[in-house]
Amino acid sequence: MELMEIEKTNRMNALFEFYAALLTDKQMNYIELYYADDYSLAEIAEEFGVSRQAVYDNIKRTEKILEAYEMKLHMYSDYIVRSQIFDDIMENTQMIAISRNKLKF
């Protein structure tokens, strides 16, 4: 899998985690099988008794929906920012603890 495909898969999985409750059952099933479970279009089509084209169209439409939710709600991007702030705080806390220990000796 190419780097861009991996990044897209990771992004879709993350968006799915945040916005799955806003999708229809069919959209949730297709996206989860395709991105999280790595099913092919043919496998999903066979599972649901539809054409590969129908699965492809539904997945593409759902990707756009997930991106639209993110553009409006910013839940994923805000999570990334909060995670980075948390990591920075933890790093600074560790550095302070190390500095205090050095001062004790």
Image: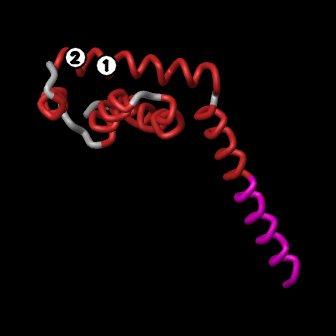
Query: Measured along the vertical axis of the image, is residue 43 above or below residue 90?
Result: above
> Marks 2 and 1: in contact by CB < 8 Å?
yes
Residue 51 found in image quarter: top left
At x 40% / y 32%, what residue is drawn? 7
Q: In this view, does 87 lie to the left or right of 27?
A: right
Q: In front here: 52 or 80? A: 52
Image quarter of residue 73 = top right
Residue 31, numbered label: none
Q: Is the magenta stretch mostly helix, strand or loop?
A: helix
Q: Is residue 40 left or right of residue 93?
A: left
Residue at 27 percent of width and 33 percent of height? 34
Question: Which residue lies under the disc numbered 1?
Answer: 58
Q: Position of residue 4 (x, y in %)?
A: 36, 27
Mark 1: amino acid:
Asn
Q: Is residue 7 magenta?
A: no
Q: Coloring scheme of the render?
A: secondary structure
Residue corresponding to mark 2: 54
Q: Which amino acid does label 2 sit on?
A: Ala
- Image point (50%, 35%), residue name: 21
**34 left or right of 7?**
left
Q: Where is residue 22 in the image (x, y as percent from the top left)?
A: 51, 30
Query: Does the magenta portion include 93?
Result: yes
Quarter placement of the C terminus: bottom right
State the extent of the magenta-drawn residues as a range: 89-105
Disc 2 packing (10 Å; few <14; some 14–19; many ≥20): few
